[in-house]
Amino acid sequence: MAEADEPKVSDLIVTEFRSLRTSDLPAALLEALSGTSQDVFPVLDENDRVAGTIGELDLLRVLSPSEPTLSFGPGKLIREGLIDDLEDMMMRRPSTCRVDEPLRAALKRMATMQIAQLVVVDKDDRLLGLLRGRDIFRALFGKDPA
């Protein structure tokens, strides 16, 4: 396949999605999770740049810390005021790709990192959309993954 004909991230970018803010309270994540089928949400800083991502697994990590030295029960980090907002919970340095990047390169990154979604950003790290494994599967095979 000629390079000009090679599929790009832009061919499958999802532009209808929900994002959150670093200053949002944890309740905003719960609301987002219950109001959409989206699994992971980009988190934007005050300059509208992608600061991280957050999802259900991050919430579970906070509710049940794995450090044996921490004697926190479920939710104690939040109840004790050790977590104020989503910035305290999110995954920093999210996996990203550029809109003009070859789809092949983005897929390879997803497989290597064992993740189902990349955040699509421009050269200034401003959010453009999402690249999701399920959309790639649907485009290739014409149906949702089982």
Image (cartoon, grey):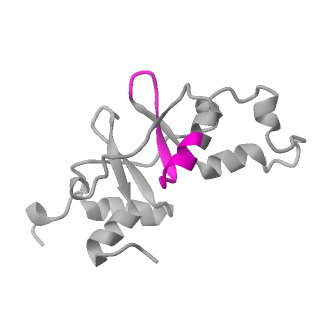
Q: Which residue is drawn at the image coordinates 40% and 60% (left, top)?
A: 109
Q: Which residue is drawn at the image coordinates 35% and 71% (left, top)?
A: 137
* Span shown in magenta: 31-48
Residue 140 horizontal/vertical position (percent): 28, 74
Closest to the observer: 86 or 28? 28
Q: Is residue 85 above or below residue 115?
A: above
Q: Is residue 5 left or right of residue 75?
A: left
Q: Is residue 134 above or below residue 34?
A: below
Farthest residue to the top: give it. Answer: 46
Q: Which residue is drawn at the image coordinates 43% and 56% (left, top)?
A: 117
Residue 133 horizontal/vertical position (percent): 40, 64
Residue 35 in magenta stretch: yes
Q: Quadrant of residue 103?
A: bottom left
Closest to the observer: 100 or 116? 116
Q: Is residue 103 above or below residue 82?
A: below
Q: Is residue 131 left or right of residue 54?
A: left
Residue 2 horizontal/vertical position (percent): 9, 68
Quarter of the figure with the N terminus: bottom left
Q: Which residue is drawn at the image coordinates 72% and 43% (left, top)?
A: 62
Residue 22 in magenta stretch: no
Residue 8 horizontal/vertical position (percent): 21, 58
